[in-house]
């Protein structure tokens, strides 16, 4: 039998009073867990019930102290994309989801070749590597070049 806690009639929660310090404190607490874009930080505070003017003030305060920095977050996403093996298309999707301008730069071909090399070294068949890369959003030309680049050259028979 499952028990659930339900507040009784006399145990109503007191209404939260938002102050600038509370708004900044909540945002700092959340930023301690992970980076946020400006849009995500504002949405976080508004979702907690913070009034719009206090949320804007807290966001501006954190931006002045470089705690919320969209350029830095965009650079971090670009680095992660290169390290993990995202395509340029995937990077643009992530930037869009976080409300960032699409200015992160990465070498799509190098990322594609890096992934192809990793998978081919593990013994994955080249046609399966090509299919995986295409599902990740790499262009056909980049996939073809990466798989051809990693194929070992056929040895010519000596006469």
Image: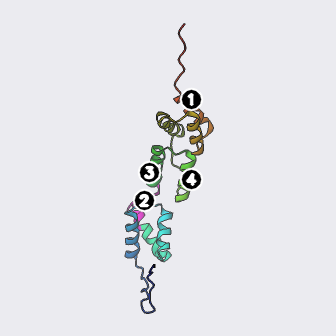
The CA distance from mark 4 to mark 2 is: 17 Å
Residue designated by label 1: 148
Residue located 47% across and 69% down the image: 44
* Residue 35 marker: 2
* Residue 28 position by quadrant: bottom left
* Residue 93 marker: 4
Q: Nearer the viewer, mark 3 or mark 1?
A: 1
Q: Earlier in the sequence, mark 2 or mark 3?
A: 2
State the residue lying farthest toward the top.
159
Helix, strand or loop at disc 2?
loop
In the picture, measured across the screen, residue 139 lies left or right of residue 121, that is right
- Answer yes or no: do the residues labelled 4 and 1 have beta carbons within 8 Å? no
Residue range corresponding to the magenta coloring: 61-70
Residue located 53% across and 22% down the image: 153
Q: Nearer the viewer, mark 2 or mark 1?
A: 1
Q: Earlier in the sequence, mark 3 or mark 4?
A: 3
- Answer yes or no: do the residues labelled 4 and 2 have beta carbons within 8 Å? no
């Amino acid at each position: 039998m499952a028990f659930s806690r339900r507040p009784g009639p006399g145990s109503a929660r007191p209404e939260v009073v938002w102050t600038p310090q509370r708004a900044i404190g909540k945002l700092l607490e959340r930023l301690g867990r992970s980076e946020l874009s400006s849009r995500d930080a504002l949405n976080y505070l508004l979702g907690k019930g913070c009034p719009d003017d206090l949320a804007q003030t807290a966001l501006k305060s954190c931006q002045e102290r470089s705690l919320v920095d969209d350029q830095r977050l965009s650079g971090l996403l670009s680095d992660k994309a290169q390290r993990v093996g995202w395509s340029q298309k995937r990077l643009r999707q992530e930037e869009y989801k976080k409300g960032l301008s699409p200015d992160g730069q990465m070498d799509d071909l190098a990322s594609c070749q890096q992934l192809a090399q990793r998978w081919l070294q593990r013994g994955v068949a080249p046609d399966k590597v090509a299919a995986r890369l295409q599902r990740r959003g790499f262009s056909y030309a980049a996939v073809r070049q990466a798989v051809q680049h990693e194929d070992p050259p056929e040895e010519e028979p000596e006469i």
